[in-house]
Image (spheres, rainbow, N blue to C red):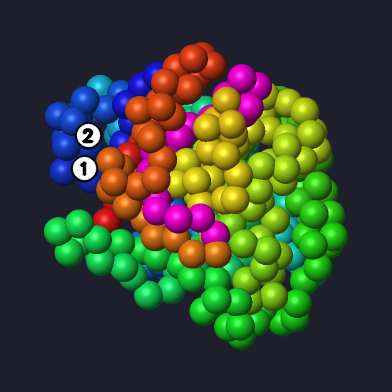
Amino acid sequence: MRCGLGQFHKPSPEFLKFAKEYGATDILLNQNSDKDNHLLDHNDRWELKDLVSLRRNVESYGMKLSALENVPTKFYDHIMLGGPKRDEQIENMVYTIRNIARAGIPIFGYNWMPSQVWRTEPKYIRGNAEATAFDYNIAKDLPLTHDREYTEEEMWNNLEYWINIITPIAEEEGIRLGIHPCDPPVETLGGIPQLLRSFDAYKRLIEIYPSDSNGIEFCQGTFSEMNDDIYEMIKYFGERKKILYVHFRNVSGQVPKFHEEFVNTGYVDMHKAMKIYNDVGYDSFFIDDHVP
């Protein structure tokens, strides 16, 4: 198990110097959904030379660029929703993922949230720190985010179609892919089913195409928001070597209402969780994720 650092969008000298001082061995760079703060310049896909430059920059500080997380939603929204540009986007995503692998970056984490992460009004916790929060009773009646309501069945069909195409390509390129849980993990938001919201949903995901390249971006914070046992999920997916890396975050409460916490103040016993990762032989990295 290794110490990583993530949730940064640009590998600036200040960030990389801090990460090295912090003792990180692994770096994760995250694509911000903000159109003005992209990890890489782009149109519809990422180029090999730019990805190689990212990796070399991190390595120049004595650390490894172990994962990239997310691409702009516009790269693959038609894949998620079965839109008219699906085939074009699949071609571009295959191109991008091949380039990530060929640049020497071994993991790509992404999500299946066409309308991204949702939160309601923040909550103030220890020391008057502002923590993000969510209340489904407020959010469930908000307007549609897209052109119509989508069904659970069609969203699963779209995901299965994608997984069956991309996983053998990932195997060929030697890269591992992992999907972040839907955050918040509720049934539906804005007319879009939140597919990856439960233990059972993730069991279904990894069985679509059983492969080391079809894994999980294990955001422990979001898994802890589910109405399932967090320790059992760590054990189950850890034993099966499906956890590619961990967002080590704590929360108070589970859906339909929760808020984020400091790592030592939420409902999850983080020492117990860490021990389970160790016991199942987890051998990748943790990032401390966003906090209040």
Reply above or below: 128 against 237: below
Q: Residue at x 53, y 38 (%)?
A: 230
Pointer 1 local density, CA inside 10 Å: few below 14, some 14–19, many at least 20: some
Q: Residue at x 48, y 22 (%)?
A: 276
Pointer 2 local density, CA inside 10 Å: few below 14, some 14–19, many at least 20: many
Where does the magenta region start and end? 236-255
Q: Which of the labelled discs sits on residue 15, or is there none?
A: 1
Decide if residue 199 is in sight here: yes
Mark 2 lies on a secondary structure that is: helix
Decide if residue 174 is in sight here: no
Q: Quadrant of the N terminus?
A: top left
State if disc 1 and disc 2 touch (CB < 8 Å): yes
Q: Is residue 115 left or right of residue 52?
A: right
Q: Is residue 162 left or right of residue 28?
A: right
Q: Residue at x 77, y 28 (%)?
A: 210
- Residue 79 place in picture, x, y as percent: 73, 58
Q: Residue at x 22, y 34 (%)?
A: 19
**What separation in Å lies between label 2 and label 1 (alpha carbons)?**
6 Å
Q: Quadrant of residue 100?
A: top right
Reply above or below: 238 against 221: above
Q: Which of the labelled discs sits on residue 19, or is there none?
A: 2
Which kind of residue does numbered mark 1 sit on?
Phe
| 243 in the magenta segment | yes
Mark 1 lies on a secondary structure that is: helix
Between 251 and 168, the residue placed more toward the observer is 251
